[in-house]
Amino acid sequence: MDSADAKIAGGGSPTAAHAHEPLTLRIKLLYGAPSFAGAAMIIPIFINMPKFYADVVLVPLGYLAMAIAVARSLDALSDPLMGWISDHTHTRLGRRRPYMLIGAPLCGVAFFCLLNPPASFTGGRAAIWFGITFILYFIFHTVYVLPHYALGPELTQDYNERSTLFAWRESFTILGTIVAAAAPGIMMQVGHLTERQAYFRLGIFFSVILTVLYTLLVLNIKERPDFVARESNPLVPGVRRALRNRPFGILLGSYVVGSIAGAIPATMMPFFNAYVIRPANPTFWLSMLLLGYFGFGFISMPIWVWIARRVGKLNAWLASFFLGISGGAAMFLLGPGDVWYLLVLICWAGIGFGAGLFLTPSMQADVIDYDELYTGKRREAQYTAFWSMLPKFVAIPSAAVPIAILASLGYIPNAIQAPRVVFAIRAIFALGPATCSVLSFLIARRFPITETILNQILDGIKLHERAEAAVDPLTGAIVPPPTPGHDEDVGWFLDYFSSGELKRYLAKGASQPVRDVLTAAAASIGVTILSVIYVLHKVSSLSTDPGAMISLIVVAGGLALAIFAFHLMRLGPARRLAAGEVPADVVRAHLGQVVEALQTGTPSPAVATGVVNPS
């Protein structure tokens, strides 16, 4: 029997390979195929829906921008919660699969409703419909997609096999994207359908396919029992330890900045195509441009896999930046009638797009192993939540503000635009993403984990399983094996607090932690309340456009609400610390370990010893 098809006791479904054993093609296909439908749904939502609701349903652009900002803020809030829930789930189906089984069909229903607003709805009522269905779509999307993505790093720990696994997943992503990008234009051109008729059919088709493919995954791939059985960690300390993980910080920083380069073109391409290039059939050419971008990304992916195996994931990823930067910047020079030049540049940039799709999640999986070296825990979903949440907060203004800016400059639907509007579309679409890609490249080049380093990390994890100390290959530090018990519990408990808060606790007395937490929570919820008041004041009537500033205020309020929830979860631990459950000398020792961890960029300080279990 092939080792990659090893069976879990009591079941006949394939599970993960061991550290250096290859996954079978069947596992890769079952894991990757659901991304076909998930990605296909994203395209009409981000590419087609803003313009459809603006030009066909006649929703003011400012309201679309506000609805997008509200929906994505709530979506971002749900990511860390869903990650924590998935990591803490222990069911017969495992930690990941129950949520795929529940979330996928619900997401399909929300998707269909979003694409099919009632024909009688226009203006304010249509804006409300858009906002509600947009919010529900992304909530249910998080329920199924975050556990799906978290399952990937668990299936294999091999450096190159991970690249292949994620390449398969992202190949289905691009394939679904191509189908969804081309379908509306082709259906309307060949089938002589209206936009509403085309979106009705697409809504039914992709909703059903999403449900079927995730059901097949759940029924045919079982999770690794050794990962499912491991204890997870408290949410807030897990956040702090993840942010102390230097490789993750580098990768996340590059991805956050780079997400701007992806969010802006997704929103602005229909406007750039229709009002800057101005082809005779904008809908058809938009489909062709998207087909070229994603098609060349799909075709180039095996080449990038080959390159990554020979020069490493990081070097392959860095090389891909050149194509996106050069192609994007050159689009600024285009004007009316340059549709073929635009198609060539879009295809050029698409080649680079294919590399980033699978290399970044593969590198993230390596970071999760580095975290396990220090924490002894598998936290795929929590890291995936970070990967999803922070870029969303950046992408909210990237997607919402550009269309709000166009509205403030005098954008008129279905008309020749004023020169200042055309210039704004050209600059936002071409120069903005190119600039962000340059910054993302400069951050990414510092990523330290290579294939050799990863193998040393995995060797260290094996040493810990034998209760032996390991060496951190990035810093040379000796890492003792994490030992479950009261000492480790105290280390996680004290990570509810920052170094500054623990120092003030030692200097000012037992009541200081509670005061610090309440002050931070009050400040955060205050910002949220002021944001809500400002938005309600400005949006007193649905008959006027709210303008660009509203989107930024909504983003600020959403981020503040996330911070408030973070501090609220720290109130109970603050009261326990104030009650003296942890001796002052242990707090001092922990502070020294945190400082060392921050200086070395390790995910976790050494475990405190000789203390009473605060739990």
Image (cartoon, rainbow, N blue to C red):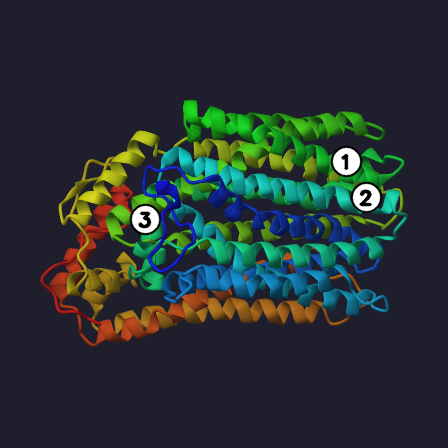
Circles 3 and 1, Cβ within 8 Å, touching? The answer is no
Relative vertical location of residue 428 with respect to residue 198 in this rendering, above or below: above
Disc on the earlier residue, 2 or 3: 2
Amino acid marked by disc 3: Arg
Relative vertical location of residue 615 with respect to residue 429 in this rendering, above or below: below
Relative vertical location of residue 122 with respect to residue 24 in this rendering, above or below: below
Amino acid marked by disc 2: Gly
| Dot 3 crowding, Cα within 10 Å, few <14, some 14–19, many 20+ | many
> Disc 1 designates what residue?
288
> Disc 2 designates what residue?
185
Disc on the earlier residue, 3 or 1: 3
Amino acid marked by disc 1: Met
Front residue of 328 and 469: 469
Left-right relation of 604 to 161: left
Residue 385 drawn at (x, y percent): 46, 55
Q: Residue furthest left?
A: 610
